[in-house]
Image (cartoon, helix red, strand yellow):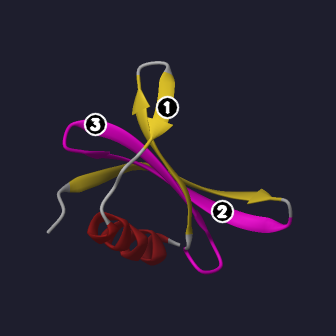
Amino acid sequence: MMDYEIKHMIIDEQYDEEHVTANFTFNNQEYSVTFQKSDLEIINAWRLEENTSLPANLSGELIDTLRKDVKKSI
């Protein structure tokens, strides 16, 4: 089981499509992942570090687990 904690989640309408962004901690690091709301396909994933964000390299297993939790919440 992946040990992470969703800290914040928002649903945002942009360009006639809704997106869901989940901010979470995993391995003592902060991340932000955005999905399309309609099918929960990943749009982007970022590792948040101080005043910057870097592309995140997250495992497929973690993304799938996060996707299931986001689906339950929306």
What residue sits right under mark 2 in the picture?
19
Which residue is label 1 attached to? 53
Q: Amino acid at mark 1?
A: Ser
Q: Name the disc covering residue 29, or none.
A: 3
Q: Residue 35 at what x, y percent from top left?
A: 57, 64
Q: How many marks?
A: 3
Viewer-closest of 31 and 55: 55
Q: Between disc 2 and disc 1, whose residue precedes?
A: 2
On screen, residue 64 versus residue 22, left or right, reads: left
* Residue at disc 2, secondary structure: strand
Q: Position of residue 31 (x, y in %)?
A: 39, 43
Which residue type carries mark 2? His
**Residue drawn at (49%, 31%), measured in percent from left and top?**
53
Image coordinates for residue 46, horizontal then vertical, percent? 47, 43
Magenta segment: 16-40
Task: State the image coordinates of residue 69 (x, y, percent, origin top left).
Answer: 37, 71
Q: What kind of element bears circle 3?
A: strand
Q: Main SS type for the magenta part? A: strand
Seen from this angle, which residue lies furthest left? 1
The residue carrying pointer 1 sits among few (fewer than 14), some (14 to 19) or many (20 or more) residues within 10 Å by Cα, namely some
Q: Are marks 2 and 1 in contact (CB under 8 Å)?
A: no
